[in-house]
Image (spheres, grey):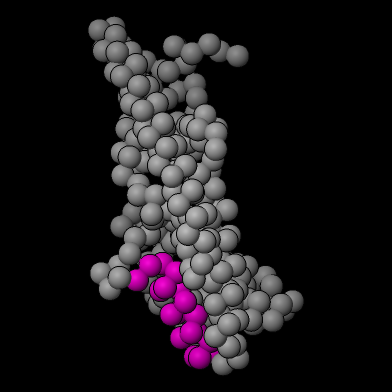
Amino acid sequence: NGYALSKEIADSDLAMVLSVFGRTAGELVVGPSVPRGGNELLSAMIAVRCLQNVLSTKHLLAITACHEMTIPFRKIDMHGQSDTDRLRERLTQTHEAFGIGMDIIELDEIVHKAVRLANRDVAAFQSPDPALFVSNSLQLILETSPNLLSPKSFTIDNYVSALKGSEHFLSGLDPRDIFPSFKGTPNSTQIHEMRTRCTHNLDIVGRYLRAMLIELYVLSAISVLTGEDVSMMFFWEDD
């Protein structure tokens, strides 16, 4: 199940976008068993379609690359290539296939710009204020959990399930996979500082979520004794 790209895209003005993302027409891009990146791909397609009559192909290539680089949390592959290495390789292939006419320096600069954008996109992970990172993480849990969209109806078990999933996800993140780098962008000192702050923030939010889960397990046990999984609003002050 999911959303697939039309095969007609291969012969359209969006073929360049597919090339930069390393995707093919007809494949699934959004769905439960599809690798992440579908949202970024669709956003890049919309951007290119809207701006193609305003910007040059070189600029559209750069915009597409920036979208691709915001796909988060990617590891080094079995060939030892990072997400930036793979993007740079596909940019060369795309530039040659579509006759865009850019040199090595220009293509490298596109990746530098994409890396700077991607690191701003995940800047919260290296926030100097751990409390702000925790607050943002909790807000994200509420926004991305369908069962929690209605504050007056979700139950303790709904909340426990959402927090457990987030704690498992965050505790499994490797700071080396969060902040991309490419040929000195960011430099070694900057990337070390970013990863150090990120490691600290992930430790803090992990401890906080586990403490919340302990509290919720107690509330859950109490609710079981009452014979029902009650709404969380029962335990929260209603503004």
Q: Quadrant of the N terminus?
A: bottom left
Asked if residue 139 shows in the view, the reply is no
At 63% from the left and 73% from the top, the residue drawn is: 49
- The residue that appears at 60% across and 81% down in the rendered structure is 106
- On screen, residue 68 versus residue 81, left or right, reads right
Q: Is residue 239 left or right of residue 97?
A: right
Image coords of residue 116 (percent x, y): 57, 61
Residue plotted at (25% across, 69% down):
78
Tell me: residue 47, above or below residue 138: below
**Residue 176 in which image quadrant:** bottom left
- Judge by depth and name the residue closer to the eye, 135 or 127: 127
- Asked if the stretch drawn in magenta spans residue 127, the answer is no
Residue at the right extreme, as displayed? 54
Between residue 122 and residue 237, name the one nearer to us: 122
Q: Position of residue 225 (x, y in %)?
A: 25, 7
Which of the 4 image quadrants contains residue 154? top left
Question: From the viewer's perspective, is 139 left or right of 85?
Answer: right
Q: Which residues are magenta?
A: 81-98
Above-or-below relation of 8 to 194: below
- Work out which quarter of the rendered image holds the C terminus and state it: top right
Residue 171 at x, y percent in the picture = 33, 40
Counting from the top left corner in percent of width and height, residue 127 is at 54, 40
Q: Residue at x 41, y 17 (%)?
A: 231
